[in-house]
Amino acid sequence: MQNNDEILSEFILEAREILDLLDAEFIRLEKLPDDKKLIGNIFRALHTLKGSSGFFAFKRLEKISHAGESLLGMIRDGQISLDPEKVDRLLETVDVLRIIIEGIEKSHSEPTGNDQVLIGQLQFLAKIQAVSDGQISQKIDSFLLTENEASIDSAIPFEPSTAISDKSYDISTPVKVNLDALDRLMNLTSEMVLARNRLLPFANVSKDLNFSQTVRSIDLLTLELQERMMKMRMQPISYVWSKFSRLVRDLSRECNKQINLIQLGSETELDRALLDAIRDPLIHILRNSIDHSIETPEERKSKGKSEVGSIQLSAFHQNGMVVIEIVDDGAGINYERVRSRAIERRLVDSVEAEGLTNDALIELIFLPGFSTKDHISSLSGRGVGMDVVKNKIISIGGSIELTSESNIGTTIRLKIPLTLAIIPALLVGLEEQTFAIPENRILELARLIKKNNETPFEDFYGTPVYRLRENLIPVLYLNNELKLDQLSDSKSASINMVVVQSDEVKFGIIVDAILNIQDVVVKPLGPLLNNLPKYAGATILGSGRISLILDVDGIAVESGLAGRIRANPIHPVAIPMETLEEEVSMLLFELNGLSRIALPLECIEHILMLNATQFQENGDKEAIYYKDLFMHAVRLQDYVSGCNSSSHSEQTVFPALTCNLNHKTYALIVKQVHDIIQVPKKMHELSSPQRGIQGCIIYKNDVINILDLEEVIAMHNAHDSSTSYPRVIDIQGVLD
Amino acid sequence: MNISYLTFFIGKNQFCIPAERVLEMNRNTDYTSVPGAPAAIKGILNLRGQLIVAFDMSSLLGLEGSRKLSEAVSIIVDVDSSPISLLVDGVGDILSLGADTFERPPNNFPLHIRNAVIGAHKLADSLLVVIDPNLLIQYLTGKVEISTPVDPLFISP
């Protein structure tokens, strides 16, 4: 019995794969009706299913797949041609087969039902033309006969190996692993990583070389194990997308629209758990596009567009996230309708609504209880709105953006993290405890010095706020938020603030200490503690102690910063990049002898603090090896006019700005880093060209030079740079 | 048919839980407190990589325990195949008791304790109160609704 069950579950798995394949292949077939190979594939797949059904004596399955197969056989042999009606019928066949398979899975026996109508239709379609040609009908009869014999005779199912060895039959799952088993393995790997973390400090202090080396190899092995494990959980996004062509086809026929679905980057890989999580939001977005955005062929024609609308799904990697874009070329968002609906739904009052920009109106779409379609259609508008989509995406650590232009279309962009299990997080100290803040929410860290023992915060009618580069951001004390004892501010001379972003709200969180950034394994808090929105989970630190992971969004909502005021963001100036396009962020720093020099922030990847000992000789240049990264050290003062290039020996710690140019990483060594400033993009030209300087800008009545990064790097890379620009590297001084 | 019970103490009061539910006992009480959690939840413990919620039994049962939690014993109990830790002042013997000595609580039993107590065994000189961890957790996670106007777990001790 056990054995039988196993064979049966294998059959169900196989059948499901075949049905998924059939779904996709039928859609392709509709577009390429003459593709003989495709028809052959479908025919074989259906035949395999029929054979296996015969083995288990599932009569319904066998009969339906037989009828479908016969019709396909005739199409394959060119006796009849494929038209949308036949595709509909065949897809319906696949649906019925799926229902039966699901029934078998539940009850281990075939559910009862009458399939005469469907079988009749299939046979009717197969006969229409056959009757008109007696010769052919005879052929069919003989064909049907042989097929019947085959299915009755074969106690052994149709040789599946031939189907699988056929390259076009793309089911490539060599080993099937239970997801549970995979998860357990993943957990063990996480534990391994944690145990490794606990081991590393011992190796660092040990004088036993053998021990250190052993630990080092364990370290490397664990790293690889972790990476491989993560890869194993990854699956291409086509796992979710493959079902969409069918969905789009069915829905567009239902709405009498013609839609072409384009899928780009379907090989992009994502964690399996995330794939499951994004399926419903994506379906919802697609439904919205088909139902609301894409116009009917007549409307499209009158607007001068192609009658066939298009929806383009694309997925790609960007900055450690997966970006999924859904672009349609439909009517776009009707902002006036959004405005009137928002007033109608009392999301905003009419005076307020008049002043809202298009961007603010888009925000309204994501509010609960918003739907602009005047009538509720069967497709979308079941009261489940974009707010649900947004919540789902946010709950997995992603974000959603929507842009729309009237009559050009709508673009929805989802940013999804690669995995949920391991995230980089900043550890912060608060009283005796350590908390973790997910790094992807952190904008910057600030250390604020108290002047005359007063906090650097201003009082905004009782609410503490901070001026961060001319923008006011609200400030939360973490100990207040977590209802811990109030710590007196007067103890230390400085305040540590973590600036975080939650939806459109940017705020500062005050903590006692900022520790370090590390990869943490997220563990859920479990059902007993999951009603605490301030935590996203917990993680076990290298010491074995547990640290709670803060949920930035949860804290924003709990403190009242987000949620209630979402319809009316209080900091429109918080996004200067969009409102003032002319401005650009620059990092202001100092070189020996040149106190104000800046570099566009987008050129810089990281800011590091390097010790003199971290510089290593590399020919006549210097190099830095930092955290598995090889960098060319560029002492900027040697290349920029007006700098004093010889005296850098007193300094022991050097700030370094890392940047990438032509696939090489450079560490630009500066004297001191000052601030990030917002300056106009337009640059003033210099009266005479200066070495290493591109131009200058005026900021708060000061002249600020802009570094010419490319020129500096070119100078650095030139072999004879030392002769053309005399310079002395005081290596002895550095090493002292 | 007798059932084995593990007895434990909160202050001077003695309680017991079915021994078959007990996975292990240890003195690992290095918990991380969870600000904002119900008062009865002391925090979370790390049991060989697994996160375990630690309950302070004295606060849960509304009793004055010996306040030094560093001397507490953590009883790891299996509830719906996910373990939890019960922090108690000390553990006693394992007793094997039959149905003949068991009595259900009277109707006027305090409601908040009835969430955890399924009855008592009549010992020679005292009543041994039997705690059902399952019932306790079901109540805490809201699976069993008990009409208490005030939730005793959310009142700080």
Image (cartoon, helix red, strand yellow):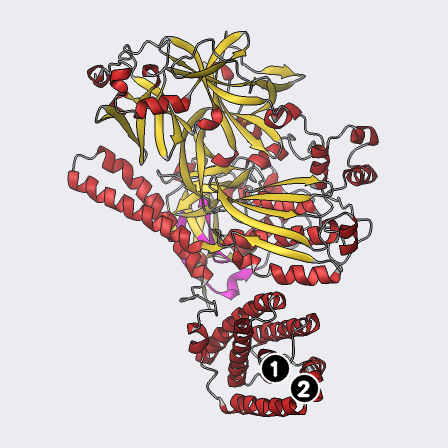
Q: Position of residue A66 (x, y in %)?
A: 59, 83
At label 1, which amino acid type do we have?
Met
Q: Are marks 1 and 2 in contact (CB under 8 Å)?
A: yes
Residue on which disc 2 sits: A130
Q: Residues within 10 Å of mark 2 (few under 14, many from 20)?
A: some
Figure check: A528 above or below A125? above
Residue on which disc 1 sits: A74
Q: Main secondary structure of the magenta part?
A: strand
Looking at the picture, do discs 1 and 2 lie on one chain?
yes
- Rendered residue at 72%/41% (across/down): A365
At label 2, which amino acid type do we have?
Ala
Q: Position of residue A657 (x, y in %)?
A: 39, 24
- Judging depth in this view, the residue of A473 and A364 nearest the camera is A364
Subunit under mark 1 = A
Figure check: A678 above or below A420? above
- Judging depth in this view, the residue of A9 and A36 nearest the camera is A36
Figure check: B154 above or below A29? above
Q: Which quadrant would residue A553 be assigned to in this image?
A: top right
Q: Position of residue A491 (x, y in %)?
A: 46, 15
User: Which residue range is magenta in the image?
Assistant: B77-103
Q: Does any portion of residue A733 appear in the rendered image?
A: yes
Q: Does any portion of residue B120 appear in the rendered image?
A: no
Is residue A597 one of those drawn in magenta? Answer: no
Q: Is residue A633 left or right of residue A347?
A: left
Q: CA distance from mark 1 to mark 2?
A: 9 Å
Q: Position of residue A455 (x, y in %)?
A: 54, 14
Is residue B96 one of those drawn in magenta? Answer: yes
